[in-house]
Image (cartoon, rainbow, N blue to C red):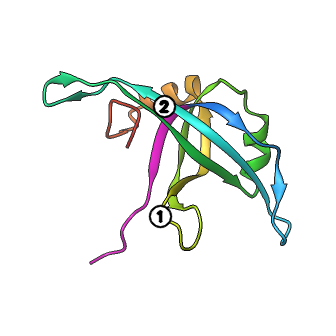
Amino acid sequence: MSQANNVFQLVAVIAEREVIRYTPAGIPIASAILQHRSEPIEAGIKRLIEFEISALAVGEISGRFSQAALGGSFWFTGFMARKSRNGRSLVFHITDFAAIEIADELISQNLDTGAKNGIR
């Protein structure tokens, strides 16, 4: 079996964001809460999906993420990982993001997102 992929993409709003903190090794981390809302079709029926998810921007991207507008909609890409080594809850690690207008342009340039509801 080949190595499994852990790629998570989400269109969401930055609802809350903490001030950048630093690990003991000096790596910057920005923590946030993202809110998602969509209405995908499931089994022929429209379904309202709303949730909040914890997210982290680690390293160089944390600076750009800390400058992004609170309440702004963005297309996020990253991966899911445990919040702590022995924990069961997950956190979304953001590896890239773009303002929704820029993301719409990328999608219109034949980028196959694989989903219509903003989640992949």
Local SS, label 1: loop
Observer-side mark, 2 or 1, equals: 1
Residue 57, image x, y percentages: 68, 51
Give the camera-side residue of 94 and 103. Answer: 94
- Image point (61%, 35%), residue name: 98
Q: Looking at the picture, which amino acid does disc 2 mark?
A: His
Residue 10 covered by magenta stretch: yes
Local packing at callout 1 (Cα closer than 10 Å; few below 14, some 14-19, many 20+) is: few
Residue found farthest to the front? 87
Residue 119, image x, y percentages: 39, 39
Quadrant where the C terminus sits is: top left
- Image point (60%, 40%), residue name: 97
Residue 25, image x, y percentages: 83, 72
Residue 70, image x, y percentages: 71, 27
- Image point (79%, 35%), residue name: 67
Local SS, label 2: strand
Q: Quadrant of residue 32?
A: top right
Please say if 72 is above or below 110. Answer: above
**CA separation in Å, label 2 and label 1:** 21 Å
Quadrant where the N terminus sits is: bottom left
Residue 84 covered by magenta stretch: no
| Image side of residue 66 versus residue 86, left or right | right
Q: From which residue to which does the magenta span run?
A: 1-12
Please give the label number shown on residue 20: none
Sequence order check, earlier mark of 2 and 1: 2
| Image side of residue 9 versus residue 61, left or right | left
Local packing at callout 2 (Cα closer than 10 Å; few below 14, some 14-19, many 20+) is: some
Please say if 34 is above or below 88. Answer: above
Residue under pointer 2 = 36
Q: Looking at the picture, which amino acid does disc 1 mark?
A: Arg
Please give the label number shown on residue 88: 1
